[in-house]
Structures are given as structure tokens and as C-alpha cells.
Amino acid sequence: MDSTYSMEERFQLRIDKEEKIEARDWMPDAYRKTLIRQVSQHAHSEIVGMLPESNWITRAPSIKRKLALLAKVQDEGGHGLYLYSATETLGINRDELIEQLHTGKAKYSSIFNYPTLSWADIGAIGWLVDGAAIMNQVALCRTSYGPYARAMVRICKEESFHQRQGYDILLTMCKGSEAQKEMVQDAVNRWWWPSLMMFGPNDDASPNSAQSLKWKIKRLSNDELRQRFVDATVPQAEILGISLPDPLLKYNEKRGQYDFGPIDWDEFFQVVAGNGPCNKERLAARVKAHEEGAWVREASVAYAEKQKNRLLSDVAVA
Ligand code: BYC
């Protein structure tokens, strides 16, 4: 490589050639910082995302639904763990990451600050929230940082099962009584707009997008992903026989895409600032689980120490 290139220029050339950046490779500090921010916030979202759904495990309407929901919530925990591990490859440890979540320094997805009021909300979360998450995460399978990209491949496979379990709940309810169909409509009315907000602010108000796109941390912009989600979701709503709560939603023949109404960004920024309906409850639940789980962490450290000593004494005998 020509030595007239700076480290930053060589790094960008690797990105431009679609080479994956690995943990031990040189990277600009700002690239590392952006990744730690995004991947850890993604991990926190998976972990906090377990709360609204686990609220319904004991009340799932059948053993089949209970098993599927249990498996889904466990999967989210697993996703959080892969993503914490991917973040740790960037030189930050788990305790720091958890502390950032618990002190409110790190964000997590706005969507998990809304309550789950009925069983139909579990269907709506699977269909809309996991649907939005997949749209974003399929693109992230091509992100430039190797450990993040590889974690995404497995996460996407599991997320597509989640999306289908949600849609299946709604399809079943929509074929049921009038009251069940109304429950679905009510849940979709409440989850539609917050799901569109998951993709983040409009491109012209997204401070991180330009650099993240250049570094190929993000592969598509917030607005591109949001549009793709709307286009994929509207036909699915038609199959369910429900409406989406947007009077301006309309197919635009010229663009070959759906036009949709304005998003309430005041609501989004209020939720992100900690003032959503469930922010305090969610953080309190995470802090409590962490404190009450201290004995599990201590026991596993003691067990690992015991195993290590046993191994050392076996080696000494041999
Ligand atoms: N909620 O410059 P921008 C899931 C923040 S699903 C809260 O566009 P960026 C799951 C943003 O962090 C969800 N905050 O940022 C599904 C930034 O603030 P900071 C998890 C948000 O990073 C079902 C500021 O607004 N998915 O896991 O370029 C069950 C300006 O935004 C949100 C991911 O995390 C939001 N919705 O783009 C269980 C995917 N949107 O950090 C679990 C990975 C924006 O500068 N992340 N902000 O203080 C991404 O793709 C990107 O980080 C985003 C935002 C598209 C979310």
C-alpha cells in the first residue's frame, strides 16, 4: 500500500472495498466509539425488550402460545448477549455497559417504553416491532464491523420466527370474534406510529447517519428503511383485514411506494429523553434484576475459580 496514504485513508479504502474490519485491526477512534454506542444500545434494546413481552407469559391463552412466547423472550436475551460480546471486542467491559444502561447514559430503543395492554399487543409487537427490527437488521448483516455483522446473521434468522409468531397471533384473532378483531385493531392503532419511530429521526435530522453510512456501519438510511417497512407492511395489514391509523397512507403510483403521514417527533424525543409511559418502570426492573442476580454472578465466578484450581492440580499431578 502506498505510504502516502494516512491511516484514516487506508481504513476508508478497506471499507470501500467491502473488507470486514476485525477487532484487532486499526480503526479510527470515532469509528470505535460509534460502534460501541450503536451495538451496545442495540444490546440494551434486546434486554429491555424482554420486559413488555414477558409481562404476558403467564397469561398467554394456550400452552402452544405460552411456549412460543417463552422461546421468543429467551431468544431476545440471547441476542442481547451476542451483542454485548460483540461490543466487548471493541475494548469496553460488560460492567461498564450495564452501568451506562442503568444510569440512563446509554439509550435503548424508544419502542420498549410503551405498555402491553392486551394479548393482541403481543401479536402486534411480533408483527410490527420485530418486523421493523428485521428490516433494519437484515441491512446490518452487511455492516463493516465483522463481529457485529456475524451476530446479525443469526439474530435475523431468529427474528423472522418472531415476526411470524406475532402475525400468526393476529391472524388467529382476526378470524375470531368481533371483540377479538377489535382488540387487534386497538393494538395496531397504538403500536403503528411508535414502530415507525424505531428507525430514528428523519435523515436530515439524524446527526450520526452521514458518517455511519460512509463507514458502512449503517447500510441504509433511517428514511429508506422506514419506507421499506411501510411498503412491506401495508399488504400484510390488508390480509389481516385491519386498517392502519394513518389517513394519509396511500399508494403513490409514480414513486411505486406508499406515502404516509407526518410522524410525531415531539413524542419520539420525549420518549428518548426518558419521559415515555414506561421508561422509569423499565429501568427500575432492569436495576432490580441486576441487584437480585448478584448471587448468580458470584456463584459462577466461584465455580469458574474452582474449575481452574482443579485443572491446575490435575496438571501438577500429571
Ligand atoms: N430509540 O443519528 P441517529 C430490537 C437516537 S429492536 C432510541 O439517526 P443512529 C428488538 C440515536 O441513538 C431495536 N433512541 O442515530 C425487537 C441517537 O442518539 P445518540 C434495536 C434512538 O445511531 C423486538 C439520536 O437518536 N435495534 O432489538 O445513526 C424484541 C440520533 O439518531 C432511536 C437497533 O438498535 C430509537 N428508536 O441511528 C426485542 C438497531 N432512534 O446515541 C428487541 C441498530 C435514534 O447519538 N441501531 N435514536 O445519543 C441502528 O440501526 C441505529 O442506531 C438507529 C439510529 C437506526 C436506531
Image (cartoon, rainbow, N blue to C red):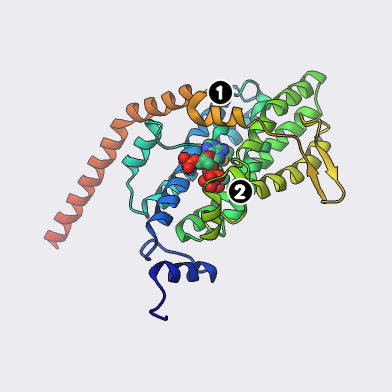
In screen coordinates, is 210 left or right of 296? right
In screen coordinates, is 286 left or right of 151? left
Whole-percent x, y for residue 64 in the image: 64, 33
Whole-percent x, y for residue 40 in the image: 44, 44
| Residue at image location 62% in from the left, 25% down from the top | 60
Q: Residues within 10 Å of mark 2 (few under 14, many from 20)?
A: many
Q: Residues within 10 Å of mark 1 (few under 14, many from 20)?
A: few
In the rendered structure, which disc, 1 or 2, sits on the residue that comes first in sequence?
1
Q: CA distance from mark 1 to mark 2?
A: 30 Å
Quick check: can you spot residue 285? yes
The furthest residue to the left: 316
Q: How many discs appear?
A: 2
Q: Nearer the viewer, residue 298 or 306?
A: 298
* CB-based contact (under 8 Å), mark 1 and mark 2: no
Q: Amino acid at mark 1?
A: Thr
The furthest residue to the top: 179
| Residue at image location 82% in from the left, 20% down from the top | 178
Tag on residue 58?
1
**Quadrant of the image occupied by residue 234:** top right
> Quadrant where the C terminus lies?
bottom left
Q: Nearer the viewer, residue 167 or 228?
A: 228
Q: Write down the residue under mark 2.
A: 136
| Residue at image location 71% in from the left, 48% down from the top | 228
Q: Is mark 2 within 8 Å of ligand 1?
A: yes
Q: Is residue 80 above or below residue 123?
A: below
Q: Amino acid at mark 2?
A: Asn
Whole-percent x, y for residue 87 in the image: 40, 50
Quick check: can you spot residue 123? no
Tag on residue 142?
none
Element under label 1?
A: helix
| Residue at image location 62% in from the left, 40% down from the top | 130
In screen coordinates, is 80 left or right of 309? right
